[in-house]
Amino acid sequence: MAVTFEPFTVAGSQHIHGEIFPYGLQVQQNNNGDASIPAVNDSVSALAQSAESGHLSELLRKHGAIVVSGVGHPSGESFSKLINAIERGRGSVPHVQIGLAGKRTVVAENYSRYTRFPANIHFYCQRKALEGGETPIAHSALVFEKVQESIPDLVQNVHECGLAMKMVFRAPGNEGTGNEFNWAGKYSFGQEFQPGDDRATQKAKVEVQVQKLTHDFRWTDDDTLELTQYSWYSTNTSKWTSELPCDYGDGTPIPREYLEKLDKILNELEVNLALDEGDMLLVDNFQISHGRKPWKGERKILVSMWEGAAPIQGY
């Protein structure tokens, strides 16, 4: 069955610098009015062609995010086929996460709080929540303009001093309350461990992984790993507004009122997407931050992260 994807207007979309955000693509069938949902492989073929031609990359560059709707057949297998067709068609490779310290935050972020973060991060709705569970996204260009206008001192201080994220990874068996992560986990720094590795060997392998992120780290007497990453990260408000102090890169505390204003700006500029089952959200992670709203009932959103060919310097 021949399938094409045609533009549609996403509810709540905005116009930013002359471009609609987010962009919408919806399945259209060339089969004389048959209303049935096409096979996944038909959508895979259509998306692969669009990716290989450069069309999808151009849409992501212009709009920052794309909602792909009407594909149906929600499952992990469907998502794998679709996203591999898109990203491998664009010449991308999967992103490997190193140094995940805890559970993901629920308001605007793009993982740039880490020194290694994906170029693209994509979402797929396998099970829609009974209530809530929207995926809010915000365009960083517009956020920056509003922050520059409303909190110019914050922008200037970040430009001059940067930001520092301090992270603590406890030793296996000594994890903190409410945080099951340690430095030995496969989602932190234990990717290269082998059965029988002693503690000294494990720590040496951990240091190889850590130095892919930062050279500013140390071991404490109880084998806790402490490290600092210096970067601009968009989770200031999600991580710190109601929890811990946040500092500039030189150790100076960021005023609480700045963080509260930043939180308000993000809330005002977000587009809240209620993805239907089988829908995909494709995100240019250099331009767009994402989050997650609270929900009731079962909800399953799958995520896929990729490295693209375009360097961050291009943005």
Image: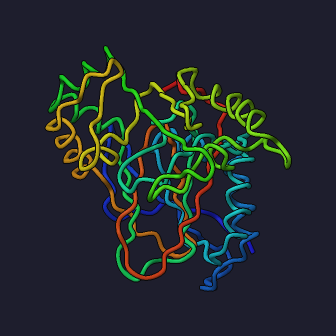
Q: Is residue 268 visible?
A: yes
In the image, residue 31 lies at what x, y percent?
68, 79
In the image, residue 37 lies at what x, y percent?
63, 81
Residue extending farthest to the top is 160
**Which residue is painted at 50% across and 41% down in the image?**
285
Q: Is residue 6 visible?
A: no
Image quarter hosting the N terminus: bottom right
What is the quadrant of residue 225 in the picture?
top right
- Colouring method of the image: rainbow
In the image, residue 290 lies at what x, y percent?
42, 51
In the image, residue 271 lies at what x, y percent?
33, 56
**Residue 29 located left or right of residue 296:** right
| Closer to the camera in the image, 68 or 170 | 170
**Residue 100 located left or right of residue 113:** right
Q: How many marks?
A: 0
**Residue 38 located left or right of residue 225:** right
What is the quadrant of residue 197 in the picture?
top right
**Which residue is painted at 36% across and 79% down in the image?**
131
- Looking at the image, is 208 positioned above or below residue 182? above
| Closer to the camera in the image, 129 or 246 | 246
- Looking at the image, is 103 positioned above or below residue 139? below
**Which residue is painted at 51% across and 43% down in the image?**
284
